[in-house]
Image: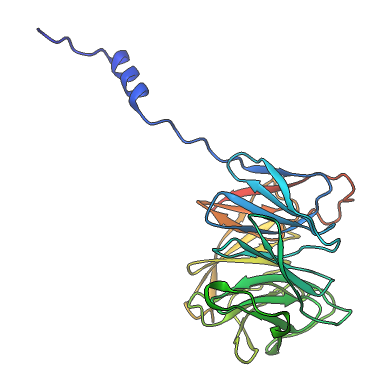
Amino acid sequence: MTRRPIGVLTAALVLLLTAPAAATPYPDRLELPAGFQPEGIAIGAGPTAWLGSLADGDIYAVDLRTGAGEVVSEGPGTPSVGLAVDSRGHLFVAGGPAGDARVVDTATGEVLATFALTGESTTFVNDVVLTREAAWFTDSFRAVLYRVPLGPAGALPDPGEVTELPLTGDWEQLAGFNANGIETTPDGKALLVVSSATGVLHRVDPATGETRAVDVEPLPAADGLLLQGRTLYAVQNAVGEIAVVELDPAGTRGTRVDTLTSPDLDVPTTVAAFGSDLYLPNARFGTPPAGAAYWVTAVDR
């Protein structure tokens, strides 16, 4: 039998029917409950983001694919600020003016542990980063870091094992908010802490607290930090931008190589990554919070 050539339209139809379906793009905006007042965000290996509320400390989980979400852990009535999640689904939560931190099981919402980081009345436990040995927390009103040691496979310690690490060296403590976002250096040997008061990024020796200013341009209105390889993303909340900084392995110097933004941003505070996108909660500081709209914005990196 002689085969007839396939026409152009027929061939196009065959390709359309046999090609794999295009993936549905994730939404660029994720709505949160009215009045939620988000600040921190954490994303694990799967397409779920967890956010903490400054209003009452609730933890809200949102599906990055659909935008559907729900409160998975009720807060203590005090703020939840910076967040970090480990591979076991343990969510570490900075407690702001309560001077504490807690660990939430993301699968059940159960509070697994609570740590009183300081007994000082003037405190704001702001952000957290996880290393293999510890969870490190900043305090925006005190020139210290708090260290919560972690056991094998991230096992949680007894509450009494928390220690303070005073910040020395180049650290300058001013009136208002100081230590804010925290990350590790690319080589993992030190910590990076940014001061909201000065915009200066610092490298901190985790053994001694000796602090040296990183050789990089200041980051005004600096808030949350996110390290991906040797690229540091620094949220600048009041200006609605994300500074993109390329660091040397030791985190002693860096170069600002880009600035990311979106018209959808309204005072973003912290940042987490999934796929090719950065996700930023909009705290909308200065907006009356009662009944106000809040959302997460996705920005292509």
Residue 156 horizontal/vertical position (percent)? 63, 74
Along the line of sight, which residue is nearer the eye, 262 or 64?
64
Locate residue 162, reporting x and y percent: 70, 83
Q: Which residue lies furthest to the left in this view?
A: 1
The foreground one among 196 and 157 is 157
When asked about the image quadrant of residue 164, the answer is: bottom right
Determine whether, in the image, residue 152 is placed left or right of residue 77: left
Where residue 72 appears, as percent x and y from the top left, is 71, 51
The residue at 52%/82% (across/down) is 189
Which of the 4 image quarters holds residue 239? bottom right
Q: Is residue 157 above or below residue 40?
A: below
Q: Return the residue found at the far top.
A: 1
Using the image, determine if residue 203 lies above or below residue 92. Answer: below
Q: Nearer the viewer, residue 62 or 270?
A: 62
Residue 250 at x, y percent in the picture? 50, 81
Residue 156 relative to residue 13: left or right: right
Residue at x 84% of width, y 48% of height = 35
- In which quadrant will I find the N terminus? top left
